[in-house]
Image: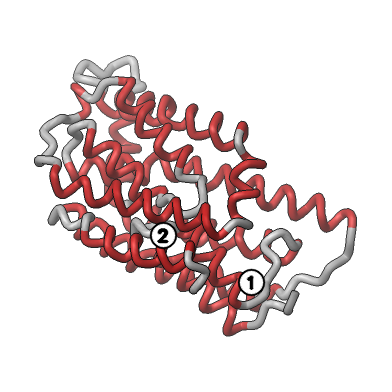
Amino acid sequence: MSDLTYLQAVVLGVVQGITEFLPVSSSAHLAITQRWYALDPESLPMHVFDGLVHIGTTLAVFIVFAGSLRLYGHRLIGELSSRWTGKRYALRILLLGVLATIPTGVIGLGLKKTFERAFGEPVWIGVGLLTTGLLLAVTACVGRGKRGWKDFAWWRAVLVGTAQGIAIWPGVSRSGSTICAATFCGLRRRWAAEFSFFIAIPAILGATALKLREAFAMSAENALPIAWGPVLVGAAVSLVVGVLSLRLLLGAVRRAKLHYFSYYCWAVGVLVIAKVL
């Protein structure tokens, strides 16, 4: 395994920032890029790097949705007050988010070893990309959603959370699968995207915590050096690029153009299965 250089960190940060939000699977692209650079994804330095670039992209969510999150927080605090007399939509969204997070955690923890083994098999990464492409293509046939939060049933939130859990499979896009699932459930496009990233925050932070915990356990067993300079640069790059790519995705969702990304997923999926990438 080669040491992580600044150039590699920048490239990986760009890849993470773009693919974490665009519906093309960050896990597949990181696995492909790490293989190009002969970097061991199970090594201590890469565990730390993966954890920090995911923190970078999580911060991108907070930056892009700062206004919406601030308004939501104020509304939620108001609704929790005993003096509140109106509809409790913010509390309902919170409960839906919790319900969506449960199947994500169950699938992620229950099938963790299976997902990790799939990362080492290019054919399964390719299958995941082809599946993502199919989901995105189907969105072109789905009409404009009309459901709001008041008629978004609990089982629909569980379905979206299940899609997020399945997206841990390499090659299956988290943003693509959750936005598609919410859209198929009839949620309005803008809210489908916002709900997708609302439930992404605990999912990404949870996965990051597991990565860093594994890194701490590995550091206790050996004293492999960590190139903190490249790691921090990669995290900063993932944050900046993540903000740009997230805004690009939201524009594509609003214009109902998600299916355009299906052609890219199919092309990369075929190349991965054919072992060209």
As shown in the figure, which amino acid type bears the numbered disc 1? Val
Nearest the viewer among 50 and 168 is 168
What residue is at 63 percent from the left and 71 percent from the top? 231
Q: Secondary structure at mark 2?
A: helix
Rendered location of residue 27, percent (x, y): 51, 57
Give the mark, 2 or 1, whose residue is nearer the N terminus. Answer: 2
Identify residue type, mark 2. Ala
**Residue 66 can be seen, yes or no:** no
Residue 267 image position (x, y, % from top left): 35, 66
Q: Which mark is residue 60?
A: 2
Q: Quadrant of the N terminus?
A: bottom right
Task: Locate residue 81, reporting x and y percent.
Answer: 34, 20
Q: Residue at x 41, y 55 (%)?
A: 129
Task: State the image coordinates of residue 23 (x, y, percent, origin top left).
Answer: 34, 56
Q: Is residue 179 above or below residue 83?
A: below
The one nearer the camera, 238 or 269, is 269
Q: Is residue 262 left or right of residue 129?
A: left
**Res. 219 in view:** yes
Task: Name the residue nearer the viewer: 218 or 134.
Answer: 134
Would you place residue 229 above or below residue 247 in this image? below
The crowd level at tag 2 (other Cα within 10 Å; few <14, some 14-19, many 20+) is many
Q: Is residue 210 left or right of residue 200?
A: right
Residue closer to the observer: 200 or 177: 177
The residue lying at 59 percent from left, 45 percent from top is: 115
Label annotation for residue 105: none
Q: What residue is shown at x 18% (from left), y 33% (from top)?
A: 186
Tag 1 residue:
231
Local packing at callout 1 (Cα closer than 10 Å; few below 14, some 14-19, many 20+) is many
Q: Is residue 253 above or below residue 226?
A: above
